[in-house]
């Protein structure tokens, strides 16, 4: 066996790399989802000052390259605050914040898709803002947002490949290593690409199933 | 008592209600007439707390709608029926009707549902309890809207042009129900363009003109030549409505 051959050990390496991406994806998606929804709540309750800050933050995050944000957190923060930031921490912070910004945008447009009249029709009966959120806004906003959210998550899974740049050993980084060793870029990057594709497809499929379940409960659309 | 005292409401610079006074006693049916843009809807929206007053006071059984702590009580006492129904599209008819009783009055669900079903029966919709609003005709939707308001057992029912989005046949359906409610002694504040119907069911008729409440008379006096009609604006309004 020559050094440049593929071995079954390489498959384990690739799987581990993919595992890193998926783990990071799951963690940052969860954090991002929670933060993004929290921001949307701040806006729903029109919390003074905080609501403006949140909108500004999300604009900033959404309109600058994730890679630049990643560099800022990984290189910039340590320089500014004299703290140590590990690559995994930097990746977690950056991707969570980025996901949060997009979740916020989706949640806000979902909430705004509900006509003011419906909310008023509840308020005049003495239903509180919280009860409106729970019984009127959330069920309809969820049905509205699930499609865009799934699309966002599929995209965010692929964005995790950026972390290889700051030295996290993920699927893309493993691809680099294998490429250097085997000198078979076409094979290596095809395999790496297919693995990302498979993972993204899985997310999309799960999302679709969830969406269908949600739709089954929305006979009310009368379509 | 539902009391509107010297209420002024402006949107930015434009005054829409200008010193409006109106008192409604339990059991009364009062119709509000007036041309488009005279402030009828705004008055209703002030009473149910959807608009903030610039001046004056509105109390529902002595609860001041301008005071956040009293608004909730005031709102429990009035029920609103909307021109465009404003049903919650993702909830069944039954859920639409029981939401407020369960959440606001804390009525146990089975009891709330029993009340809702009884109301639905009274408006001829007993078999549509599980339908969604999108599956109903306009007239049926508005009947659900009425049930939703009645389920809160309001002392005062506020109705803002509840038939103007409906065709004549559906209008008749809904008016029949309102006539029945009036006969049962339900207190109603009724904004409408259905002059003849207002004449049949109202104890009193008030007329809004450019935000001022210029006439407030018992129904027969309102239509008398030496009563409401003596006001040029009222005479003009009534003759215009006739032609339509
Ligand atoms: N939210 C608002 N912002 C600005 N102007 C408003 C608003 N709501 C109502 N107005 C204005 O206030 C005036 C009175 O409106 P309102 O809806 O109360 O009239 P109305 O008597 O109910 O008329 P219609 O018979 O057409 O329903 C109108 O000139 C309208 O343009
Ligand atoms: Mg109106």
Image: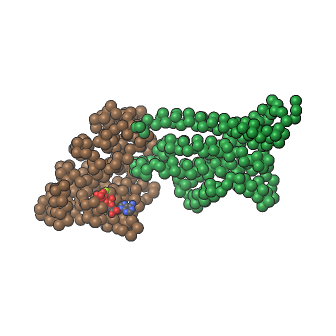
Chain colours: A green, B brown
Residue B244 lies, in percent from the top left, at 19, 55
Q: Residue at x 27, y 46 (%)?
A: B166
Residue B240 lies, in percent from the top left, at 18, 59
Q: Nearer the viewer, residue A181 or A57?
A: A181
Give the answer, above or below, for where B226 lies relative to A71.
below
Q: Nearer the viewer, residue B177 or A177?
A: A177
Q: Is residue B137 left or right of residue A165?
A: left
Quarter of the image with the N terminus of chain A in it: top right
Q: Is residue A79 left or right of residue B218?
A: right
In the rendered image, is residue B138 in sight? yes
Residue B115 lies, in percent from the top left, at 35, 36
Quarter of the image with the C terminus of chain A in it: top left
Give the residue at the far right of this rendering: A2
Rendered-image quarter of ligand 2:
bottom left
Number of numbered markers:
0
In the rendered image, is residue B25 in sight? no
Q: Residue at x 83, y 42 (%)?
A: A180
């Amino acid at each position: 066996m020559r050094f440049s051959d593929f071995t079954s050990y390489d498959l384990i390496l690739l799987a581990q790399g993919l595992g890193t991406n998926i783990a990071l994806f799951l963690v940052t998606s969860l954090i991002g989802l929670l933060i993004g929804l929290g921001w949307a709540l701040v806006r729903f309750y029109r919390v003074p000052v905080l609501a403006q800050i949140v909108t500004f933050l999300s604009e900033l995050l959404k309109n600058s390259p994730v890679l630049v944000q990643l560099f800022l957190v990984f290189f910039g923060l340590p320089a500014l605050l004299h703290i140590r930031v590990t690559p995994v921490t930097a990746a977690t912070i950056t991707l969570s914040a980025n996901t949060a910004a997009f979740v916020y945008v989706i949640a806000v447009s979902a909430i705004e898709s509900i006509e003011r009249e419906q909310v008023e029709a509840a308020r005049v009966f003495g239903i509180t803002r919280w009860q409106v959120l729970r019984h009127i806004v959330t069920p309809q906003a969820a049905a509205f947002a699930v499609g865009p959210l799934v699309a966002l998550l599929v995209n965010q899974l692929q964005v995790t490949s950026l972390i290889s740049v700051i030295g996290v050993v993920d699927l893309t980084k493993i691809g680099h290593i294998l490429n250097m060793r085997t000198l078979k870029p076409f094979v290596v990057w095809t395999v790496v690409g297919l693995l990302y594709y498979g993972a993204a497809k899985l997310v999309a499929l799960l999302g679709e199933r969830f969406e269908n379940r949600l739709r089954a409960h929305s006979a009310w659309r009368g379509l | 008592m539902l009391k509107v005292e010297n209420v002024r409401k402006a949107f930015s610079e434009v005054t829409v209600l200008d010193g409006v006074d109106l008192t409604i006693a339990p059991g009364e049916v009062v119709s509000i007439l007036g041309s488009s843009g005279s402030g009828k809807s705004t008055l209703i929206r002030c009473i149910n707390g959807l608009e903030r007053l610039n001046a004056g006071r509105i109390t529902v059984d002595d609860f001041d709608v301008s005071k956040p702590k009293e608004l909730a009580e005031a709102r429990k006492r009035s029920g609103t029926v909307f021109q465009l129904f404003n049903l919650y599209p993702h909830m069944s008819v039954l859920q639409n009707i029981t939401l407020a009783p369960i959440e606001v009055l804390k009525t146990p669900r089975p009891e709330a549902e029993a009340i809702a079903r009884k109301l639905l029966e009274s408006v001829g919709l007993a078999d549509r309890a599980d339908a969604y609003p999108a599956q109903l005709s306009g007239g049926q939707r508005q009947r659900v809207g009425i049930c939703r308001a009645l389920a809160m057992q309001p002392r005062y029912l506020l109705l803002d042009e509840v038939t103007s989005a409906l065709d004549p046949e559906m209008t008749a359906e809904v008016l029949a129900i309102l006539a029945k409610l009036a006969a049962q002694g339900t207190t109603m504040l009724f904004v409408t363009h259905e002059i003849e119907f207002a004449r049949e069911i109202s104890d009193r008729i008030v007329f809004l003109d450019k935000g001022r409440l210029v006439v407030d008379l018992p129904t027969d006096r309102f239509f008398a030549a030496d009563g409401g009609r003596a006001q040029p604006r009222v005479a003009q309004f009534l003759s215009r409505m006739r032609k339509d």
